[in-house]
Image (tube, rainbow, N blue to C red):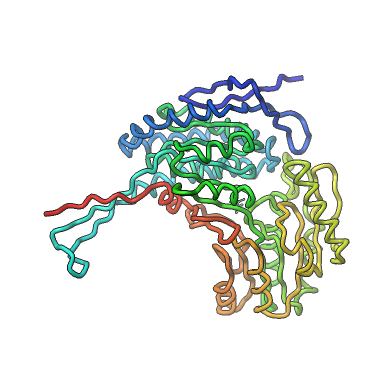
Amino acid sequence: MSEITNYKYYVGGKFIQSTSGNLIEIICPYDQSIIGRVQAISKEEADVAIAATKAAQKDWADTDLFKRADLLNKWADQLEIDAEEIAQMIMREVGKTWNDAVKEVTRTAEFIRYTVQEFIHTNDAAMSGANYPGGSKNKFAIIKRIPLGTVLAISPFNYPVNLSVAKLAPALIAGNAVVFKPATQGAISAVKLIESFDKVGFPADILQLITGKGSDIGDYVSEHDGIDMISFTGGATTGRHLSSFSTMKPMVLELGGKDPAIVCEDADIDKTVAEIMSGAFSYSGQRCTAIKRVLVHATVADELSEKLKTAVEKLSVGMPIDNPIIVPLINEGAADYVQGLITDTIAAGAELLVGNKREDNLIYPTLFDHVTTDMRLAWEEPFGPVLPIIRVASDAEAIEIANASEYGLQASVFSQNFSRAVAIAEKIEAGSVQINGRTERGPDHFPFLGVKNSGMGVHGISRTIESMTREKLLIINV
Ligand code: G3H
């Protein structure tokens, strides 16, 4: 039997062991083997990591932009070199298929390169006092953007590399230091990510990787005076809790969703089915942007549900290495929750079209028709492969149900009448509405945001840079 590795955390440009002696075992979601252990660092060690960023950040911000850019571009190149090794860990640790795991790493390299270019091409702005009534034509303001200081980046399990770098790269190119706290399941992938970072030759202490249970050090570091900004992606409950620490501290939160697909009677049903299938079931629905409910006009509901049923029956199910669509969920608790929702929906009287089958953490794709708004599945986010069809009588009813959710991340509208689709989209309370396409975050330079319990602030390359910098005015009096 091969030995189990104890992965170290990363501070001062070195991988080190915690003196706490506490380790957290990381279990593979699909074969239940122990993948490795990560350090559960102490609060004192978090203090040291945060304190060390302070001097390092000032030097980093003073470093020539093209030197910073060069290091980040080298990291992107290194990620491509290390892609298979990192993807191997993503697959083992979060149960993502091999193809998706590799894609996650290459998408991340592209993300870094675009981020560098975006920042290089963002110039300072200028204003003249003459443009305000009674203002002085002798006053000129140069409006610079300067880094905030030390950014706390907290990333989720489902994109342990991409959603981490979506915070790290904008923070670093803008001259911030980063304290990076990945989700515990996903923390070894984060170690792998930082191993590739370490090979490039960045200065010490501008990026610290700290690991440990959120319940032990999460609040501590979030409240910490040494943290100047928090960027979090994860569940709505944790996000809400974190928002209580946002007093005088900027924060961007990207949380859950219950993204609706609204299907009008004039939709291209075959295209709609293809988009819904990919939107709802990729990575077993473990995406904040997954389609999590279908609101279909009653006149086309039979046709849509029949076609969706056929498509769900054909979905490949299996282990990540074989690249199926449906893979085991992240852990037993997640599978229990999704199974509970399925059982509850059957008891509530919805029509089960396919599914309701479970093997350990593997939940087979499940489709319900005739789900009504008094059922939990109409409102709760499963983060699993279960999709409810809710029949509606009008666009107005679809909009009303879409907006009654506590969430507002994205939505899709399917109609061949563009004006009608736009009219619906304009009434939907969500960060983005996709017309005739599945809900998704990319391309990664688009602004990405949620309203209500889906988030606060905006992600997406240029917007993330904005959120991690502030304006500073230099006013010239001539
Ligand atoms: O889980 C939340 C992610 O931001 C979703 O990203 O739409 O690229 O899968 P995606």
Q: Residue at x 50, y 41 (%)?
A: 109
Position of residue 238 relative to residue 448, above or below, is: above
Instruction: Provide residue 340's location: percent of width, then percent of height.
Output: 82, 52
Q: In which quarter of the image is residue 174?
A: top left
Position of residue 45 relative to residue 303, above or below, is: above
Instruction: Provide residue 102's location: percent of width, then percent of height.
Output: 61, 40
Q: Residue at x 51, y 46 (%)?
A: 231
Instruction: Provide residue 131's location: percent of width, then percent of height.
Output: 21, 67
Total marks placed: 0
The residue most toward the left is 478
Quadrant of the image containing the C terminus: bottom left
Q: Residue at x 63, y 69 (%)?
A: 403
Residue 304 visible in image: yes
Is 462 displayed left or right of 130 in the figure?
A: right
Quadrant of the image containing the N terminus: top right
Instruction: Provide residue 162's location: percent of width, then percent of height.
Output: 56, 43
